Amino acid sequence: MNYTETHNKLLANIESKGPVDENTRELIFTLAKIITEEHKLQGIVDKEGISYDTTGYNGQKKIVTRPEYIELQRLRDKKRAYIKAVGLGHVDAESNEKQDFR
């Protein structure tokens, strides 16, 4: 799903509950960007994995966490906070599953 579709879906969901003020519109705008970026990063992690092997300075083998995976985790935490702020539903702090915004 692209940014515009995500934004429109979120906005329609929140508008179905009543009028939306400018602050909530800004939160939805940012949340849609976060979700779009999350999908992009998840695609990279699905394709490349969460870590990779590299060689350290002294020739030792190192397993390094992929930066995209670290960013994905950070975005998911941020997404939970925005979902809570907008009031789009229950957010389980332990869950990393995709949220259903219906």
Image (tube, rainbow, N blue to C red):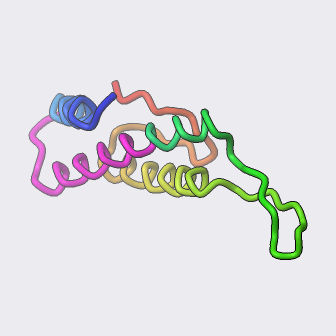
Nearest to the observer: residue 34 or residue 13: 34
Tag count: 0
Nearest to the observer: residue 59 or residue 63: 59
Residue 15: x and y in percent read: 15, 34
Q: Which residues are magenta?
A: 17-38
Nearest to the observer: residue 3 or residue 17: 3
Residue sitting farthest toward the bottom: 58
> Is 50 placed left or right of 43 in the picture?
right
Q: Quadrant of the C terminus?
A: top left
Q: In the rendered image, which quarter is residue 19 located in?
A: top left
Residue 80: x and y in percent read: 46, 49
Residue at 81% x, 63% y is 55
Prevailing secondary structure of the magenta residues: helix
Residue 10: x and y in percent read: 26, 35
Residue 31 vertical position relative to residue 47 in the rendered view, above or below: below
Residue at 60% x, 41% y is 45
Q: Is residue 96 magenta?
A: no
